[in-house]
Image (spheres, rainbow, N blue to C red):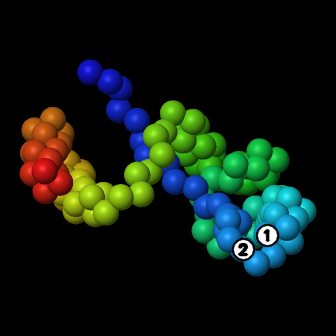
Amino acid sequence: MEDAAPFAGVNSFYVASNAANAGFAQQFMTDVASSPDVAKAMYEGNPLPPVNLELREEIAASDEHVVIFAEAAEAADPMPAIPAMAAIWGPLGIAQANIVGGADPHSTMEGAGEEIATAIG
């Protein structure tokens, strides 16, 4: 049996392969989007642990959770970008709420796993 691993997602920028101004877009990515100021603005809009290590250290001075989540992300699997993931969140959320409410974690998660397996078949 494998150890459990969290899912991780990232915010990113892409240059479309058929972009009319792909060179300008690539230059924007290199010169602007990769700057620590942009990473900080993105963090302020959506406070997820930044990949920019300098910014992560700055934020960690006032929020130790950033480091905890960043460390967890190091062992994470990429979040699958498939429609079947929608079938997971409902049963998983209910199971987690039931566990917080006192339900047995092992049997509750097994039940959620069975429900998810049935849903994604």
Identify residue for label 2.
19
Relative side of 3 to 26, left or right: left
Relative side of 26 to 120, left or right: right
- In the picture as drawn, the residue positioned furthest to the bottom comes out as 20
Q: Amino acid at mark 1?
A: Ala
Question: x, y percentage for residue 15?
Answer: 71, 66
Question: x, y percentage for residue 96?
Answer: 24, 52
Give me the residue at 43% from left, 46% from top.
Answer: 7
Relative side of 23 to 119, left or right: right
Identify residue for label 1.
22
Quadrant of image for the N terminus = top left
Between the residue at mark 1 and the residue at mark 2, the CA separation in whole angstroms equals 5 Å
In-front residue for pair 65/45:
45
* Residue 120, numbered label: none
Give me the residue at 30% from left, 58% from top.
Answer: 85
In-front residue for pair 60/53:
53
